[in-house]
Image (cartoon, grey):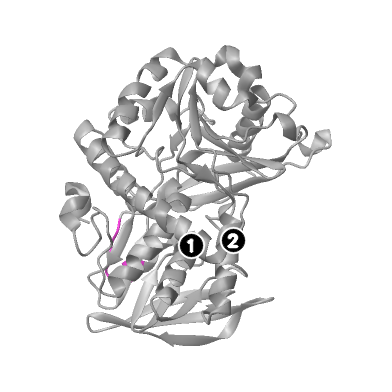
Amino acid sequence: MKIIVLGAGIIGISTAWQLLERGHEVTVVDRQPDAALETSFANAAQISVSYCEPWANRDAPAKLVKWMFRNDAPLLFRPQLDWQQWRWGLQFLSQCNDTAFERNVQQIVALGAYSHVALKEVVRQTGIEYNRLECGIAHYYTDEKSFASAGSAAALMRKFGVDRKVVSRDELLKIEPAFKAFAHRIVGGTYTASDESGDARIFTQELARRCAARGVQFLYNHDVLRLNKEGDAVQSVSVRARSADGPGPKEQLLRGDAVVVACGSYTAPLLRTVGVDLPIYPGKGYSATFKLRKPELAPMVSTIDDEVKCAMSRLGDHLRVAGTIEVGGYNLSLDTPLAKARCQMLADRIEAVLPGVCDTRNEAQGGQPNFWTGLRPATPTNIPYIGRTKVGKLWVNAGHGTLGWTHGAGSGKAVAELISGEQPAMQFGFYGFDAGKRGTAMAQA
């Protein structure tokens, strides 16, 4: 079949590769000049099968109210005059109970485990190098009450086959000695040896190069203008090349046997133009990438800081730190007071946890901070939409939230299998196939 993939992030490129593996002819369209230049560009770098809890839990509503007045809040809901945001928020609240939480965890872990195997298969096939570290993921706590809840969270993960261990402060420091300077604040932690980390941008771009070498057509610098629906199916996609002076003059019509929409947060508005309405809403996330001043003192184990809800991962001679989610629309600015405060929080935290290890100086101090922001395509459950829509020939692979890198390889493989008439070997509610498995709120979408 001839298949058009819209989006060249980790999800779109993984989809293209897996379709190619199954003998399909593939065209990939993206508005950027290369792959992985939007949401996949500078994420937390974690392949976190074990640390994948949904944002929605029974404690979330009270925390959201408390955090609404904090610029550095881990999860900040910024109300807009936007019906889609409010609908998303109401569905999110419907998931803030123990039953929904456990159901959603089961789905997310299943996809994560499947995806981790798929990623390892691709790496073996291609030999791609991407600053990969197979050192596991640790999670440290600075609050006794929060640490007390770590045991039940670890038990839930073990129920679904994930070996997350609760460890003491001393055990954590043996696993990762880099946090000794911060040891007086740490009360304990958890650790999963099977997780890993690496640079999603490098991986995605290298996989895209291999796709191109095997015949995938890439239309970079092309805007998707519309999906052209005739009858009950999408028959073509209208795209237009960008020029140095702005949009090009001519539209191009792409025809195929199937169209896969993998445009991250921009998937939902595009699908709505043909009557497919999915609750995918952007969560603005931030990251900073710091040059290491003292590489010998930097962590090798990718780690989550529970107090500020940020993750840090070693990427060669740099440290990536990422965190905070802002649910407030499609704004990507780094120049607002709020954005600056959230970026500064990341720098301040790294300096507190790993004093002098990274160059966290701002420009006025002679440093070169490398801050970034991207839109995480979030669903109220944190379960992505993978499958076929009600419109003929139209498929979706989007809504991965903060877990696009973790779930990318498996999501691409799963949708390629479904398009090819195969059944992915995991217990997951695929959209358009097993809607009931997704839970009541999502089944109604």
Does dot 2 land on a helix, a strand or a loop?
Answer: loop
Q: Quadrant of residue 58?
A: top left
Residue 436: numbered disc: none
Classified by dominant secondary structure, the portion drawn in magenta counts as loop
Mark earlier in primary sequence (1, 2): 1
Q: Is residue 402 above or below residue 68?
A: below
Does dot 1 land on a helix, a strand or a loop?
Answer: helix
**Residue at 37% of width from left, 34% of height from top?**
163
Camera-side residue of 202 and 331 = 202
Residue 215 lies, in percent from the top left, at 53, 82
**Residue at 35% of width from left, 70% of height from top?**
416
Q: Is residue 276 magenta?
A: yes
Q: Quadrant of residue 96?
A: top left
Q: From mark 1 to mark 2, how far is it between C-alphas?
A: 8 Å
Q: Amino acid at mark 2?
A: Ile
Camera-side residue of 182 and 227 = 182
Residue 195 lies, in percent from the top left, at 47, 41
Q: Is residue 312 magenta?
A: no
Q: Is residue 156 above or below residue 211?
A: above
Q: Is residue 51 left or right of residue 152?
A: right
Q: From which residue to which does the magenta span run?
A: 271-278
Camera-side residue of 55 and 183 = 183
Residue 42 lies, in percent from the top left, at 59, 50
Q: Are marks 1 and 2 in contact (CB under 8 Å)?
A: yes
Q: Is residue 118 above or below residue 364?
A: below
Give the position of the N terminus as an image quadrant: bottom left
Residue 122: numbered disc: 1
Residue beneath disc 2: 128
